Amino acid sequence: MKKLLLVLAFAAALLPNCVQAGQELRMSQVSAADGAIGQSMDRFAARVKERTEGRIVINTFHNAQLGAERDNVEAIQLGNLDIAVVNQSVLGNFVQEISAVDLPYVIESYEHADKIFLGEIGNDFLAKLDNVGIKGLAIWESGFRNLTNSKREVNSVDDVAGLRIRVMENQIHQELWRSLGADPVPMAWGDAYTAMQQGAIDGQENPTTVIDKNNVVEVNKNLAITEHCYATVFLIMSPMRWASIPAADQQIIMECLDEAAVYERELSRTMDTEAVETLKLKDMVVTRPDKSGFIAKSQSVREQFGKRFEDTLKKIDALK
């Protein structure tokens, strides 16, 4: 009997390690599978499986299959979801400092963006997520956001007046479009297509790859290259799930994320350029309005919210 008890005790001690030896993780995002983010997620998942010899299997879910972005963040905090890819604007509701990069026209180029998000500022954002029950893994690119609508060509900021535009549930984005004369409508991305199709809203704003891969051209025929904000997505994880992964496999995951980050940015920028030409072929009218009018009218937004992020904005400005 004593021998049996010893065997059972030994088996129980080994059980956690057996559970840890093979794990399936769910990874969620709200956009299309064939966008730069979706393709990079799938590549990352395949690389992790290969490098861990099947110990870690990441199942990817696209097109909001597992809920809207805010739902995903809250599921991460509760431990009900393993990994999510979430726009910076949504995370700004959880870590206020992240909202500094949502201010219009504070990020001037891809080179400027890389210095911000791949350096000290980006690392600081990821670290601050620890304080709200989120493990920050990495920051990928979504790209510069542009405006589409079903009503008219936008050749100047004056043409924005009166347009009902879907925006993220983010106060800065809402105030930006109010300052430009539009009527912002906060809405989950998963609901936006139907709302445009039914005429409840006139348009939306997103990077051109997102616009292309989510078939926005079917409901909006006018694209204005406004580049009013640069957007990233944060890869976040349940701290409980992260802690359950052996240290050696955690290291492999981070190495795979580094590889994926380089791949995703290169792919995103290539696809962004190609998307404009693709949209033209699909009969979308593309205009390039003078940004100076947009910059001038949105100055009040930078002043209103900039006071909250003075230190971060000084660091961003110093990297230009």
Image (spheres, rainbow, N blue to C red):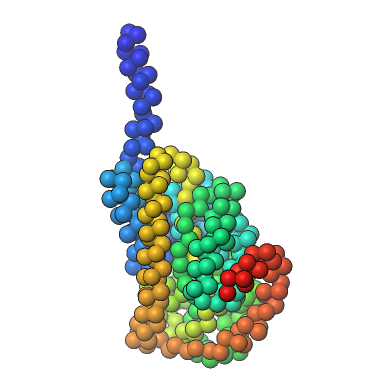
The quarter holding residue 42 reads bottom left
Q: How many marks?
A: 0
Query: In the rendered image of this protein, does residue 45 appear above or below residue 111?
Result: above
Left or right: 230 as drawn, with respect to 218: right
The location of residue 277, given as percent across then percent down, is 36, 84
The location of residue 41, given as percent across then percent down, is 37, 59
The location of residue 213, given as percent across then percent down, is 37, 73
One can see residue 237 in this view? yes
Residue 170 vs residue 258, the one in the foreground: 258
Quarter of the image with the C terminus is: bottom right
One can see residue 67 in this view? no
Query: In the rendered image of this protein, does residue 3 appear above or below residue 70?
Result: above
Name the residue located 65 percent from the left edge and 79 percent from the top edge.
Answer: 298
* Residue at the farthest top position: 1
The quarter holding residue 19 reads top left
Quarter of the image with the N terminus is: top left
Left or right: 245 as drawn, with respect to 184: left
Name the residue located 35 percent from the left edge and 14 percent from the top edge.
Answer: 6
Name the residue located 47 percent from the left edge and 53 percent from the top edge.
Answer: 137
The location of residue 72, given as percent across then percent down, is 48, 54
Name the residue located 43 percent from the left edge and 39 percent from the top edge.
Answer: 244
Residue 199 vs residue 167, the one in the foreground: 167
Query: In the rendered image of this protein, does residue 78 appear above or below residue 147?
Result: above
